[in-house]
Amino acid sequence: MADLEPVLATLEEYADAYCAKDVDRLMALFVEGENISLIGTGGDELCAGRSEVASVFERNFGEATANTFEWGWKHVAIYGDAATIAISLIIHLTADGAKLRVPVRWTVTLVKTDAGWKWVHRHASAAASSQDEGTAYPTDGG
C-alpha cells in the first residue's frame, strides 16, 4: 500500500498557509507551470492558470481570516504517481468580526514530482441545503 503521509501532509501545509494568508506558500503546493485549476464554492470561482488561482486566494483573504481547518471524513487513492484526496472539512474563520464555521467538501488531485507531491486541481463544494438526507436530488422544486 502506498504511503499516505506525504499526500496528507499537503493538506496541513495548505491549512497553515491559508490561515497565514500566504499566497506564495499556497501556490507552491501546486505543480509548476500554468496547467493548474481550482473550483471554489462561489459561482464565479472557476479558474485555471496561476494568476487566476492566486486571485481566488487573494479575494478570500480580503473577505475573511481563517483560524483553523477541522478535517472530517476522508478517502485517499494513490495510483502510481497520481493521487486523489476526497475530504470533508469545516473551516473556522472570522469575517466582519463574526466567527463562522464553513462546512465544505474537497477533491484534490495530486501528482508525484521530484519535489514531492504537488496539487494539480482543487475542487470545493458545499452540500446542497435543499436536499433531504437519503435523497439523490434537491426536493424543494427549485
Image: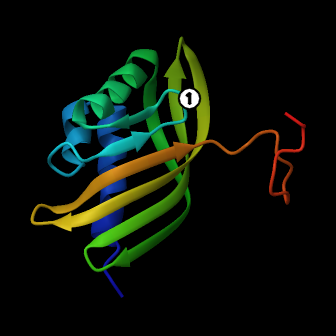
Give coordinates of residue 91: x percent, y percent. Answer: 52, 38
Q: Is residue 21 shown to the viewer in this render?
A: no
Q: Is residue 50 left or right of residue 92?
A: left
Amino acid beneath label 1: Gly
Quadrant location, the N terminus? bottom left
Q: Residue at x 83, y 45 (%)?
A: 138
Q: Residue at x 36, y 63 (%)?
A: 8
Give above or below for 14 relative to 23: below
Q: Determine the residue located farthest toward the right in the rendered image.
A: 140
Give above or below for 85 relative to 103: below
Quadrant location, the C terminus? top right
Q: Residue at x 35, y 69 (%)?
A: 83
Q: Is residue 62 left or right of residue 98?
A: left
Residue that mark 1 sits on: 43
Q: Circle 1 — which element?
A: loop
Give coordinates of residue 105: x percent, y percent. Answer: 56, 49
Give coordinates of residue 71: x percent, y percent. Answer: 51, 53
Which quadrant of the figure has residue 67? top left
